Image (cartoon, rainbow, N blue to C red):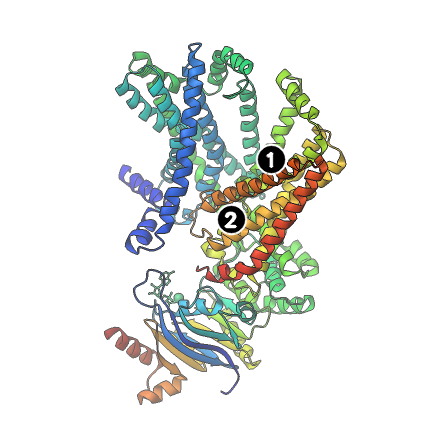
Amino acid sequence: MARRVLSLILAQLNMNFAISHSRYYYLKKRQRLWEPVLIVLGVGGAAASLAVGIYTAASYYYSTAAAIGQEAVTLTLGILLSQVLVMILGFVLVIAVFYFSNDLAILIPLPLRPAEVLAGKFAVILASEYVGLVVFVLPVIIAYGVRADVSAVPYVLSSILVFLALPVVPLVLAAIPAILLMRVAGLSRRKDTLAMIGGFLFIGVIVVFQFFVQTKAPGVGEEAEFLAKMLATANSLVYIVGARLPPSIWATKALALAGTWQGLWNLGIFLVAGVLGFVVLLVIGDRVFYQGVLSGFEAGARKGAARRAGKAKAAGYVSRSPIASLAIIEMKLFTRTPVFVLNGFTGFVMFPVMFVAMFLMRGNPEMARLWDVLLAVPAFDAIGALVIAAYFFVLAAMSSIPFTAFSREGRRNIWIPRSFPASAKTIALGKAVGAEIMVALGAIPGIAVLGYVARLPLASVAVGVVFGVMSSFVLNLCGVLFDMWRPMLNWTDQQKAVKSNLNVVVGMLMGVAVLAVLGLAVNFLINLGLPAWGVVAGVGGVLAALLAALVALLGAVADRLWSGLEA
Amino acid sequence: MSGASLLRLEGVSKTYRGGTRPAVDNLSLEVRAGEIFGFLGPNGAGKTTTIKMVVGLLRADRGTILVNGHDVARDPVAAKADIGYVPDNPDLYERLTGIEYLNLVADIFGVSREERRRRIGELLEMFELESAVADIIQSYSHGMKQKLALTGALLHDPRVFILDEPMVGLDPRASRLFKDMMRSHCDKGHTVFFSTHVLEVAERLCDRVGIINMGRLIACGSVEELRERRKQTDETLEDIFLELTEAGEAK
Ligand SMILES: Nc1ncnc2c1ncn2[C@@H]1O[C@H](COP(=O)(O)OP(=O)(O)O)[C@@H](O)[C@H]1O
Ligand SMILES: [Mg+2]
């Protein structure tokens, strides 16, 4: 049994990190060597600078916290935040990896217990989480170790164990509701819809929870009085948090008291909690995991087939222009894939929830002050228009929809658009328009809340929406074009197509670049002494110019990229 | 056979990135209007590679490919508009319904509303897919997916109908229908180009066959011509195929 599971886990990890795949292409065939170099340099550089930033922040936080003898809060906060992150990402990851991996149809016929397959898949997720935690939590642990008076050997040993056990409990806490959700959803005919709604509910609950915890603990670098208050409440924070996620307290004590019996005791509880959680997951999973997977193999489409067949005859033959048709199909394919929706639409749901939470908390003195400051900003209506435009832009950047337009087709389906007698420009535009409609529709709830809460005049909202559509379309075009050049088609589960896709990172960088251009433009226009609305008009001009340039670029290069794509 | 040339390959070669030997090596052939052309060869001979180059999924390293006179490299859109393509593995958009997929294809190929109503109706009836067309493609059997792919590829009545291993997965009835359909498609002055290793079908159905081995075209002509050339009139296509491809192997 152990051997079997181990070899399953190793094979899963191999596929997940494309180890044999990379060895074959980069080492044996020595091709596209610039790719790993680029990945190492780009991602490694970004991760390293992020890690250094977190180290610095943790070190600074330590100093302030140490002033009142609460330095261990540094660890608690770092561990807690990373665990919340693991939980949010983990939930979607569990659904994607457990239920929508390409290899499930291969694994299930094998003589393995559901729990064994589940363990293999769990290992995949855990491994991915470790990669993230190296960047997010390791710097905090190191910063604490460097600053605090700890005995080196026990601290390092405890660190390793705590680090390894860190994501297990939150991942189990995300995985159990996820597999129960998929089990229940599997009973229903609308299982995809149910899975998506359940997923967003989970994310919403975690976001609200996190929001309330966080407003009680303002971040580093705030005003001095905030900081003083935070430090005064440091203990209460630990207990608020501890009451909900005690493992973060155990982990804190295991590290801070490393080398003492109390440290060892806490380390023990922390590890046992992880193991116990995992065992509970396996026990539950062994009962319900396969049922959820198997119901996913049955397309839930038989419903009303006869009725709809008639309808298809009557109303099915609508002819549309190629761009419209491609845009509609892009939306259908995206919205009918739960994993894409859970990833891509998170921002659409998360921001309105946050806005509402902020609004509801306007009674809170700090929040009230924030609102007063905001509403007192001069030319608030003009700025409000830009804020709304920026909201579209941020949603597009976060959605990863345009940057994966072709990647999502995957090896299996890319032949379909590629055999269409449509110019690459048409195909790219179809995808970009589809992405734009999804982003624009997704922006409505957030904008409604924003507009209402900030009491923006209708004109500001209207201008903001127009500019928002323009700015997000700029980003959509950039993203679609880039993804046309280098789509990631070889994914093993849908999650990889939208999350472990370098193009998404590139897309965010493009977003930053576009924002920089716009920022420079705004700065320039303000220096010209234009009134606020003049600046807004100027931004519109810049956006229009960018759009025109991109459409021209599309015409110039798309065909070459499209025909150069070998799949 | 003296119809217009609908598909022409001239000196086409392709080596996969990192590959040591060409998957397709200096291949030339021509298929004329009204012809059914069978593209034969053992596994790994280069059939799929050739077809992918014709339909624009791969770029040829050398040589030219003309589809109804349109150069695939220079004018891909016009070339694709004349092609109906069914890949070896009919992976379709699992999350669309059959009719949604067909409408997409019809929109892209610019099939008018009346035309699509007529042709979709006809093809679905022929393949007995009418009752499934409102269902999501994920719920289809392999053969149903293949039939849907065939329907999609035939919607615009393509001049050049290209199929990669089409017989795999069709039931006897569908396979019969399909053969009749290829014939009538050619009788309209179009052309059918398909790869296979089912030699009986090729022998009965094809006006001409080409045999490819290790990327090279080693024989081309009608089955009679091949027999005559070898001066062994009692040989089946299978005999010819095995001898030719083994000879290639030995070299
Ligand atoms: N994507 C690919 N990458 C590298 N080599 C490939 C790829 N596809 C096919 N080949 C190689 O090209 C040759 C021809 O393959 P293919 O055209 O698929 O053969 P056939 O369809 O005749 O069975 C084989 O040697 C195969 O290994
Ligand atoms: Mg093949």
Amino acid type for the residue under numbered disc 1: Val
Q: Mark 2 points at which residue?
A: A404
Can residue A281 be seen here?
Answer: no
Image coordinates for residue B224, horizontal then vertical, percent: 39, 87
Judging depth in this view, the residue of A202 and A459 nearest the camera is A459
Quick check: A330 above or below A13? below
Chain under callout 2: A
Residue B131 is drawn in which quadrant?
bottom right
Image coordinates for residue A4, horizontal then vertical, percent: 29, 41
Chain under callout 1: A
Judging depth in this view, the residue of A558 and A512 nearest the camera is A512
Query: What is the number of the mark on residue A349?
Result: 1
Q: Which of marks 2 and 1 is in front?
A: 2
Q: In which quarter of the image is the N terminus of chain A?
A: top left
In the displayed structure, does residue A504 sit left or right of residue B223? right
Earlier residue among tags 2 and 1: 1
Image coordinates for residue A431, horizontal then vertical, percent: 58, 53
In the displayed structure, does residue A238 sit left or right of residue A253? right
Judging depth in this view, the residue of A546 and B216 nearest the camera is A546
Amino acid type for the residue under numbered disc 2: Thr
Image coordinates for residue A124, horizontal then vertical, percent: 38, 39
Query: What is the number of the mark on residue A269?
Result: none
x 68%, y 26%: residue? A377
x 45%, y 82%: residue? B207
